[in-house]
Amino acid sequence: MTVEHPSARLLAAYIDDGAPGFDGAALAADELWAVEAHLETCPACRARLSAALGTAAPAVAALTAAVWSELEPQLAVADPAPPRRLAARLSTWTTPAMTPWLAMVLVVTALALLLDRANTGPDPDRISLLLVLAPVLPVGGVAAAWSRGLDPAYELTAATPRAGLPLLLRRTAAVLAVVLPALLLGGWATGVTAAQWLLPCLAFTSTTLALGALVGVTRAAVAVAVGWLALVVAPTVAAGRTAAVLRADGLPLWGAVLALGVAVVAARRGAWTAPGQDR
């Protein structure tokens, strides 16, 4: 894969954007965060930035050199940083606010499994609670993964260069890593085929992210869950038989919803660097 490096124009604008008294046009939020994220991992571009800084802002370069000259002897004798523990590594994938939501998902899955096992019978139209609830089980965890109200460290996280869609996708993957194995086990125990719950589950997750780019993740999660309960769960329970959209012949529909959601997320990937996606 070819790595794209910031152009000279972007580096110059990045320097000007942080220079005292600068009154020109600031970098767009997505450009600013992209440049900072790239500089974290590219020594060559950091060297380019340092050379450009010495020309464009000599006072800032002189101040940086003075600070570094004082720090360098101390860093040379300092003890090396200890290796990152597992908890620190997991913190880049999860947030403490997600833990109770994921625990609740596992409890709901277990209860649905027990009720399904108690309600086994020959009727092919019998309602499977696991199948009915599977599409919305990840939604709460996705909302908790990117919510100002649920995550006490949201402000710190949102200010980092790696915030935005990449971090949200990483946390969404962590949610699915917990939810999907539980559903797989439940589906195996109740005889529900994996495709029947997997496609709706992924389709609702992508729909939540797609709507989240427009109205915020929390509002999108609430809208998706309420819509599913009103349009599918309630009629299913009232009719006493599994809805058509949850049967095997409804799988192409879920595939189309999943593809549409992924396409919207990809098309609006820059929206996650804008304020308001935490609502």
Image (cartoon, rainbow, N blue to C red):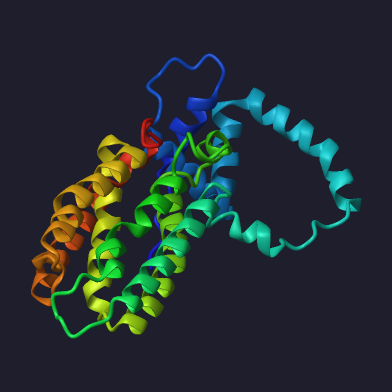
Image coordinates for residue 220, horizontal then vertical, percent: 29, 42
Image coordinates for residue 164, horizontal then vertical, percent: 42, 44
In the picture as drawn, the residue positioned furthest to the right comes out as 77
Quick check: can you spot residue 107? yes
Q: Nearer the viewer, residue 147 or 266?
A: 147
Q: Is residue 34 left or right of residue 241?
A: right
| Screen quadrant of the C terminus | top left
Q: Nearer the viewer, residue 32 or 175?
A: 175
- Please report the residue visible at 58 percent of the width from the left and 38 percent of the height from the top: 153
Q: Nearer the viewer, residue 165 or 202?
A: 202
Q: Is residue 3 left or right of residue 68?
A: left
Vertical placement of 155 versus 229: above or below?
above
Q: Which quadrant of the structure image shows residue 60?
A: top right
- Please report the residue visible at 24 percent of the width from the left and 52 percent of the height from the top: 207
Image coordinates for residue 78, horizontal then vertical, percent: 88, 51
Quick check: can you spot residue 44? no
Image coordinates for residue 9, horizontal then vertical, percent: 39, 37
| Screen quadrant of the N terminus | bottom left
The mark tally for this picture is: 0
Vertical placement of 184 versus 63: above or below?
below
Q: Which quadrant of the structure image shows residue 135?
A: bottom left
Q: Nearer the viewer, residue 44 or 254?
A: 254
